[in-house]
Image (cartoon, rainbow, N blue to C red):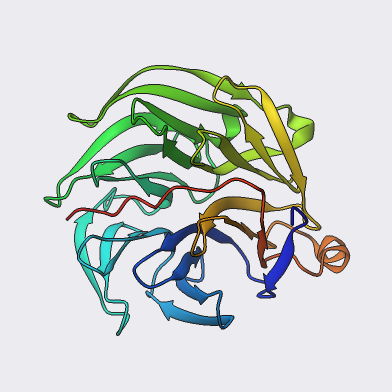
């Protein structure tokens, strides 16, 4: 089933950051500016919402069973049962013009997440790494809209999106040290195809990329060639993630906040959560190790 199916008609502002929590058999994702963490059960279609009280750009399960979020001013733990949050580390706490955006966990359990300007000013953000001991390092700067990030199956490459560059870049990755080097373009996205947003790497090494304002998800082979294009009935696709018992479901978050009234009327499913069976499987999500 390669046709996207709407599984949650949320009509949300800005859904992002889906990740499969295998221990709970739930899909986690966020509605960024509303500060909501969603916990969706595909078996029952129940969607539980936790309000963390501030904008939240990413969420990830941890090795100890709770969640960590990249929130407005840094990284926080979230108790999945109560929704209580506790600060791990602040990021750019001296600024009120930036916020945290997308993020993902590397093969050694470190959470990488970046920042962006809240007024979309260029080159005001950076990419950060939260280590299991709670320390934070700035890994890349400047960036404008820090977005999709994931690693190759062998852990030697890191794929990364700074949206206004219209590229997916790739770095050589040192898993032991958590270091990146030798940045180069992996694939360049024509402006007519949309803006590169969130991404995820499947079990075969394929890179799945959401195209914001492109209404599509692209799959690229490891050599950078385009393998597959999946079209959606909405234009603001934000990020894909594999989930389900066999990791064969591809969930895709979408947004509505950048649409005007006429566009919203033409796209009544905008801001919903979609699912399809693309014929390949994903990989288990890395858990934050702290």
Residue nearest the viewer, comparing 164 with 25: 25
Residue at 60% from the left image edge and 22% from the top image edge: 224
Q: Answer with the quarter of the image where residue 288 lies.
A: bottom left
Please indicate, yes or no, whether residue 224 appears anywhere in the rendered image. yes
Q: Is residue 290 above or below residue 161?
A: below
Residue nearest the viewer, comparing 183 with 173: 173
Please indicate, yes or no, whether residue 97 appears anywhere in the rendered image. no
Residue 248 image point, x, y percent: 57, 55
Q: Is residue 77 above or below residue 167?
A: below
Relative horizontal placement of residue 222, taking residue 12 as reference (left or right)? left
Residue at 23% from the left image edge and 32% from the top image edge: 178
Relative horizontal placement of residue 290, taking residue 254 as reference (left or right)? left
Residue 287 image point, x, y percent: 29, 54
Work out which quarter of the rendered image holds the C terminus and state it. Answer: bottom left
Q: Is residue 113 above or below residue 74?
A: above
Work out which quarter of the rendered image holds the N terminus and state it. Answer: bottom right
Relative horizontal placement of residue 159, taking residue 68 as reference (left or right)? right
Residue at 79% from the left image edge and 32% from the top image edge: 192
């Amino acid at each position: 089933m390669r046709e996207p199916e709407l599984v949650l008609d949320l009509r949300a502002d800005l859904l992002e950051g889906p990740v499969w929590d295998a221990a709970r058999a739930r899909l986690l994702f966020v509605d960024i500016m509303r500060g909501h963490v969603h916990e969706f059960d595909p078996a029952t279609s129940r969607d539980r919402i936790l309000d963390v009280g501030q904008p939240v750009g990413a969420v990830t399960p941890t090795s100890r069973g709770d969640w960590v979020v990249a929130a407005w001013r840094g990284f926080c733990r979230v108790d999945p049962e109560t929704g209580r949050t506790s600060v791990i580390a602040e990021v750019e706490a001296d600024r009120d013009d930036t916020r945290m955006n997308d993020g993902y966990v590397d093969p050694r359990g470190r959470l990488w997440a970046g920042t962006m300007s809240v007024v979309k000013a260029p080159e005001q953000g950076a990419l950060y790494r939260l280590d299991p001991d709670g320390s934070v390092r700035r890994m890349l700067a400047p960036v404008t809209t820090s977005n999709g990030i994931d690693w190759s199956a062998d852990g030697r490459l890191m794929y990364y999106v700074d949206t206004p560059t219209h590229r997916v870049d790739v770095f050589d990755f040192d898993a032991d040290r958590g270091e990146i080097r030798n940045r180069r373009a992996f694939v360049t996205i024509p402006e007519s195809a949309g803006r590169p947003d969130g991404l995820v790497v499947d079990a075969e090494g394929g890179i799945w990329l959401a195209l914001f304002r492109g209404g599509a998800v692209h799959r690229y082979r490891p050599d950078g060639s385009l393998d597959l294009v999946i079209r959606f009935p909405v234009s603001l696709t934000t990020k894909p993630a594999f989930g389900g018992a066999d990791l064969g479901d591809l969930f895709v978050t979408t947004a509505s906040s950048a649409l005007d009234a006429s566009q919203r009327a033409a796209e009544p499913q905008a801001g919903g959560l979609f699912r399809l069976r693309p014929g390949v499987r994903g990989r288990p999500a890395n858990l934050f190790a702290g």
